[in-house]
Image (tube, grey):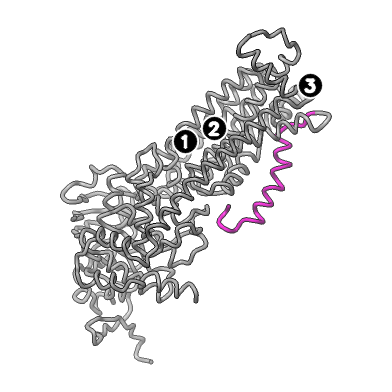
Amino acid sequence: MKHQTQMTKNLTCDPAAVTDGRDCGPANLQSATSRAAQTPEGTGGGATNQSVNSAGTKGPLVLAALAIALCVMAVVALTVGRYPISINELLSLVWNAIFRHDAVAFGASHTVLFNVRLPRMCAAILVGMALSGSGACYQGIFRNPMVDPSLLGVTAGSAFGAALAILLSVGVAGIQLFSFGFGLVSVFATVMLSTFVGRRGEKTLTLVLCGIVTGTLFSALLSMIKYVADPYSKLPAITYWLMGSLASVNMSDARIAAAATVAGAIPLLLVRWRINVLSFGDEEAKAMGVDSGRIRAIAIVSSTLMTASAVSISGMIGWIGLVVPHLARMLVGPSFPILLPASLLLGGAFLLLVDTVARVAFPIEIPIGILTAIIGAPFFVFLLARGRRGWV
Amino acid sequence: MKLAINNMSAGYGSRTVISEISVSLCSGEVVCLLGPNGSGKTTFFKAILGLIPSRGDISLDQRSARTFTTQERARALAYVPQIHIPPFPFSAMDIVLMGRTPFIGAFSAPSAEDRREAARAMDLLRIGHLRDRNYAQISGGERQLVLIARALAQSPRFLIMDEPTLHLDFGNQVRALDLIRRLATGDMGVIITTHVPDHAFICATRVLALLDGRIAADGPPKEVLTCALLKRMYGVDVDIVSLTGGRCMCIPAMGGAM
């Protein structure tokens, strides 16, 4: 009842406007617009500006808070561990490294900080950013909050690539290269397959189904490799890789991951508004002037690049790409231009936190993929229980 | 502005749904597209909007629509889809802002000016108070108005509405039809589909009757909507009753048993 009276009020509260429309004939929309703005009882003027301001300032504030959280987390990650480094020591080490280039002066601390912790911290941030950013992007363009970056088969392909490389004993660089390459191949295969299958009008659904096909195929191939792998040397290596870990990351890995993540994130940040509109489906987006095919292609290529590079240095780290975008959406809302940077920052901070816990909290290091799932699973149940109000 | 469609055919894959449609529509008109299920109403819309490929010519003020970019076309033709709920909790303002996309550069986000335009479109429909509400939590009638506001934010020359009265209660249906009539003034035309011929009597200046993908009739509602045409379109007997105010209504003839 309340709603109905409200509606009545909305449309008829200014009877003059209604009569104008009918009697004066071609009073055009522009004049009607200005009339509405001038109507004293209307909600124009001050209320408009207020809303614009509130929508415009909350997001940047949250982003700033997330950036600070990431920096704090970075300092924590660099200082804690089996070889603790105090804040003062950290500062003087950094000062020394930048201005004096004297590696021997601090000995072990210098090695721990710059050869072990710094690359690992960078890798954790980058992998977290890559997985969360592409997760947010995929959830938007596939219009499904249950989606994560592995949707089109990239992680299945990467896992197969890494396992194959381990089986063929091609070394650490080879594992990364194979993993990255097969990740890309897998998504490419998905896209080709969906083009081949065709089905006008249901392109998104076709793409998702083809992603399931490719993912299943590569999982089967992975099982085959595990089956033929030497159970005493190769199989444990494959299993360990699949659990995901950042323990063996060095600075050159981090540099490659940084390049790929930046190369993937920049196009997404550029076409952020178009991706936002794409979450209303291809047809509506097109009717609003978005070249949906091209924007989706940009989104998929960028996300695949980020995810494949992340998986190639860290192994399989699940849940981040699914859960972090939800968390970011709770903080800043679903609008992609603000959701993407929020997901990137939050993902970086979150994975860095989990990696630090994995490194510090237990006597032996727990593979990070296990921890993200242990933390992620109950959290996701919480989201499900809380959800149903339009997927927060 | 004039939307001229000449000899247009369209369909899905090898199946042709609408064929050889020629019609020209002007701003200021409310064109009501009537036709039974499967007669090609939605296909007609999709073809005009360029969402599916079509043969023949579509031109806007003598300029072929094929030469329009997606963005240019969106500034001329806006689409109001059937009410739906997106998977994410967008605010009404978020959604209306998306209507500004044809004016936003490929690498940009909405400016303050775009926000003002979106707010203006909402105020025009008197839904300014819904600005920060979650679109998923407002009523069906309000959702319809938000979608119309989004289309108005495109400042189009033609508003193309797919069953704007679907899922609305009786009062909101009447209000929506009244709004449609008011929107079609001056430099904007409205094209709607509906399954209720009465709606054409209420708000349309012109009826296009589609039957098996072809135009079966075209003209003012009172001239076009005859018992014979309704029988041909829907396969049921209908009486058309003239009311005292001059309006007409369709009354299904139920075999006289009542």
Along the horizontal axis of the image, is A277 left or right of A245? left
Specify the segment rendered in magenta.
A365-392
The type of residue carrying mark 3 is: Tyr
The reply to the same-chain question for discs 3 and 1 is: yes
Q: Earlier in the sequence, mark 2 or mark 3?
A: 3
Position of residue B31 relative to residue A148, above or below, is below
Q: Residue at x 48, y 38 (%)?
A: A193
Report the disc number at residue A83: 3
Q: Residues within 10 Å of mark 1 (few under 14, many from 20)?
A: many
Residue A354 showing in the rendered view: yes
Q: Residues within 10 Å of mark 3 (few under 14, many from 20)?
A: few
Which one is in front, B38 or B81?
B81
Query: Secondary structure of the magenta portion, mostly?
Result: helix
Q: Are marks 3 and 1 in contact (CB under 8 Å)?
A: no
| Chain that bears disc 3 | A
Looking at the rendering, which quadrant does residue A355 occupy? top right
The reply to the same-chain question for discs 2 and 3 is: yes
The type of residue carrying mark 2 is: Ser
Q: Residue at x 32, y 76 (%)?
A: B235
Looking at the rendering, which quadrant does residue A387 occupy? bottom right
| Residue pointed to by mark 1 | A268
Q: Residue at x 37, y 58 (%)?
A: A45
The type of residue carrying mark 1 is: Leu
| Chain that bears disc 2 | A
